Image (spheres, rainbow, N blue to C red):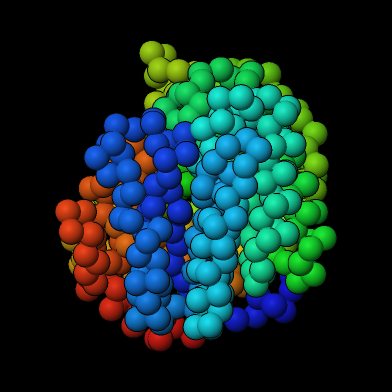
């Protein structure tokens, strides 16, 4: 761990993921969701990336988080696409030429189809295959200091191994635990690989954290389930980075203890924060747990049905601060067609961020999700997160009022 002066400049940025902007015919998700049949290239960002990168200059950001699409880089098990690697290097070069710090995500949910079919995460062979990929790109990609190894590993786990709504589409708790151990093992080894090649590298994961609360505070079972969920979803990964031991606590089950090689393998910590979730006991639900969003604060629900709860950002940042490394908000955003709601969402959350910094929480960056409208997992093309609106018929990008407001916030806040 390090609290490095290289993070002394506050990073104002936006975040994206490759597949959500450009698709890929070689990815597991390409055949997973029928919506992509009609829009396989999504926003055609792979072709229009230079135009989109110009939008970053218009915003006035000094950082940009994006991902590499593994399936483009390695479309077949033993085939490397050097042109795809050169494409992502060109993105990095353009960013650096414009004094915009690149933050690269190595894995953002999607996999090459060959990987998920032959080496899904619960198979130990997945480790070697992923590390071959990590070794390849860190040998070929230059000019990047900030690296995210995995985006939201717990979301990948819950979607892919609990609910079965994401590839590999499995519903098996035991396999889920094996998959999580292998993913975290890959983080630990990738951390070492990156540092062996880049002397000033800053490496993290992006961990989705939520404010979790009991549905009824007077109900002891609701309170118990909220406590268990809060530990599993928010805290267990933090403890694993501190101790090298992962403790998994499921409702009404024995604690599972796993040794994972990630102790101290963290230079900063990426926090993705969107919402609060209320939890209650329901004997007819899996593990007796029911999750709901409620509009408690009066700010409404987003188009995803998520509660807008700015105060929760302070809670999760306080949780994360026990890691004693700098924190970066690697995603925060709202799905809505209403630009005015976007501006209010940003202001409320950045107000909370400013309060946290003034109160001594070491936050070094804020990345709004997302630059332009994109494909949203299992939601299609109508979850409008973008600061720039995309007409999916013409693929024209149009700035929203929220884009101008974000530029104003960047200029007006002195962190």
The residue shown at (61%, 24%) is: 118
Residue that appears at 39% across and 86% down: 412
Q: Residue at x 51, y 18 (%)?
A: 171
Which of the 4 image quarters holds residue 116?
Answer: top right
Q: Is residue 163 visible?
A: yes
The foreground one among 268 and 116 is: 116
Figure check: 122 above or below 240: above
Quarter of image, res 327: bottom right
Q: Quadrant of the N terminus?
A: bottom right
Residue 134, image x, y percentages: 69, 50
Query: Looking at the image, which residue is at 82% across and 60% down?
Result: 196
How far across and how far down the image is residue 281, in percent? Answer: 42, 22
Q: Position of residue 20 (x, y in %)?
A: 39, 50
Splitting the image into 4 quarters, where does residue 407 fall?
Answer: bottom left
Give the x, y percent position of residue 18: 45, 53
Q: Determine if residue 218 is in view.
A: no
User: In this orientation, which residue lies closer to the viewer: 186 or 319?
Assistant: 186
**Front residue (pair 147, 53):** 53
| 386 w.r.t. 351: above or below | above
């Amino acid at each position: 761990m390090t609290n490095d002066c290289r993070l002394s400049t506050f990073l104002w940025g936006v975040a994206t993921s490759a597949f959500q902007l450009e698709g890929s015919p070689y990815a597991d998700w390409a055949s997973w969701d029928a919506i992509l049949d009609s829009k396989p290239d999504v926003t055609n960002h792979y072709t229009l990336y230079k135009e989109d990168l110009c939008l970053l200059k218009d915003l006035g950001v000094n950082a940009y988080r994006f991902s590499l699409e593994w399936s483009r880089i390695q479309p077949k098990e033993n085939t490397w696409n050097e042109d795809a690697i050169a494409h992502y290097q060109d993105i990095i070069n353009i960013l650096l030429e414009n004094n915009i710090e690149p933050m690269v995500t190595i894995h953002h949910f999607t996999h090459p189809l060959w990987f998920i079919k032959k080496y899904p995460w619960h198979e130990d062979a997945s480790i070697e295959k992923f590390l071959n990929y990590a070794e390849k790109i860190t040998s070929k990609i230059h000019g990047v200091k900030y690296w995210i190894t995995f985006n939201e590993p717990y979301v990948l786990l819950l979607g892919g191994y609990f609910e079965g709504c994401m590839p590999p589409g499995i519903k098996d708790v035991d396999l889920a635990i094996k998959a999580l151990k292998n993913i975290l093992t890959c983080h630990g080894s990738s951390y070492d690989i990156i540092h062996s090649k880049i002397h000033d590298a800053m490496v993290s994961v992006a961990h989705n954290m939520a404010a979790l609360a009991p549905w009824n505070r007077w109900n002891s079972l609701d309170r118990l389930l909220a406590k268990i969920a809060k530990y599993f979803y928010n805290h267990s990964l933090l403890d694993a980075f501190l101790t090298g031991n992962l403790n998994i606590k499921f409702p009404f089950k024995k604690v599972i203890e796993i040794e994972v090689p990630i102790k101290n393998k963290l230079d900063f910590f990426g926090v993705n924060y969107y919402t609060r979730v209320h939890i209650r006991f329901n004997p007819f639900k899996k593990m007796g747990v029911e999750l709901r969003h409620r509009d408690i604060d009066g700010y409404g629900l987003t188009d995803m049905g998520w509660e807008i709860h700015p105060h929760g950002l302070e809670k999760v940042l306080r949780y994360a601060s026990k890691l004693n490394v700098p924190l970066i908000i690697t995603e925060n955003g709202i799905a809505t067609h209403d630009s005015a709601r976007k501006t209010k969402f940003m202001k409320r959350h950045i107000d909370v961020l400013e309060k946290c910094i003034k109160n001594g929480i070491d936050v070094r960056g804020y990345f709004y999700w997302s630059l332009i409208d994109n494909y949203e997992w299992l939601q299609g093309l109508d979850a409008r997160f973008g600061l720039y609106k995309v007409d999916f018929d013409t693929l024209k990008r149009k700035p929203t009022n929220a884009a101008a407001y974000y530029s104003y916030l960047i200029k007006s806040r002195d962190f």
